[in-house]
Every structure is written in C-alpha cells, then in structure tokens.
Amino acid sequence: MSKLGTLIPLDHLSKHQAGESVRVVAKIVKFDAAEAVLEGPNSKQVRILNPNTDNYTNSRFIEVMGDIKDPNGEIPSIDEVKSVSYGNKFNLSLHDRMLRLVSGNYRAIFRASPSEVDDSAMETE
C-alpha cells in the first residue's frame, strides 16, 4: 500500500490505522539488521521493521517512511519502505514543535493553495 505518507509526530501513531502510510522523524536508540527502535522528543518509541542498514549506521537522527503495522502496541511498529538519514546534529524538539504547528490548530495558515500565493514578491529583476 505504501506511498510517502503523511509526516506525523511520533506520539500520534495511535491515532492512525494499521496499513496507513506515514513518515516519522526521530532519534535512533537501537539498531540491528532485523529492526530499529526510534525515540521522539517526548520519549515515545517506535519499532522499525526491515530497516535500511545504510541509513542507520552513521546517523543519530532519521526520517522513516513506511506502513503502520501495530499502532496501539506497547511500542508501535512501522514496516519501513524508505528512510533518510538526518545526520548527527538535528534539533528534534524544534522539528516536533513545527510539525505540531503545521498539523494542529494553525494548519490553515500553512495550507494556502498555489492559486492563493502571490509569487510577485519572490521575483527578481
């Protein structure tokens, strides 16, 4: 079923259904060839099944795109389709706060349609 999915805060996994495609950004806590464990800024964890080993070995932070397997388990799980290394220096707390702004009560101000955006201010001569 997988596509890129919706970028969500890690602690919102339980609000989504098994099989749904999502994206999460978190800190790598544990990694081996079979699975990885990631942790968000609020200490919430997620198990990543079938991790791409190349993206986990030299990084502390990662974005994972995949399908939710168990959203309500003690540690929810995602079957990885793709991942992107974010390196070793990344402000996870700031990322989480910004994600909550664009997906929470203020999401309308971040969702202008292309026809509503005035690009004239961006033009250069």
Image (cartoon, rainbow, N blue to C red):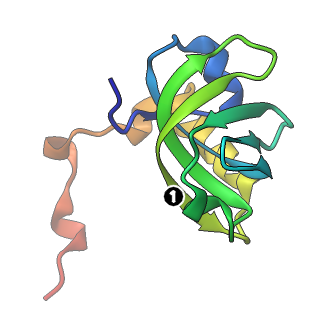
- Whether residue 36 is situated above or below residue 90 in the rendered picture: above
Image-based side of 111 in relation to 54, left or right:
left
Q: Quadrant of the C terminus?
A: bottom left
In this figure, what is the number of numbered marks?
1
In the picture as drawn, the residue positioned furthest to the bottom comes out as 125
Q: In this view of the protein, can residue 106 be seen by the observer?
A: no
Q: Could you say which is closer to the camera, residue 118 or residue 60?
A: 60
Residue 64 at x, y percent in the picture: 54, 45
Q: Is residue 121 left or right of residue 41?
A: left
Q: Is residue 103 visible?
A: yes
Disc 1: which residue: 84
Look at the numbered disc 1 and give the secondary structure of its residue. strand
User: Quadrant of the image for the N terminus?
Assistant: top left
Q: Say above or below: 109 vs 95.
A: above
Q: Give me the residue at 64% from left, 37% from top.
A: 48
| Residue at the outermost front position | 33
Question: How far across and how far down the image is residue 44, in percent?
Answer: 81, 31
- Residue at figure coordinates x 74%, y 62% from the top left: 60
Tell me: residue 85, above or below residue 50. Answer: below
> Seen in the image, is 6 located left or right of residue 11?
left
Which class describes the residues within 10 Å of circle 1: few (<14), some (14-19), or many (20+)?
A: some
Q: Nearer the viewer, residue 70 or 97?
A: 70
Q: Position of residue 68 (x, y in %)?
A: 53, 22
Residue 92 vertical placement versus 120 (above, below): above
Q: Which three-letter amino acid code belongs to the residue tagged 1?
A: Val
> What is the quadrant of residue 89 in the picture?
bottom right
Residue at position x 51%, y 10% from top?
Answer: 17
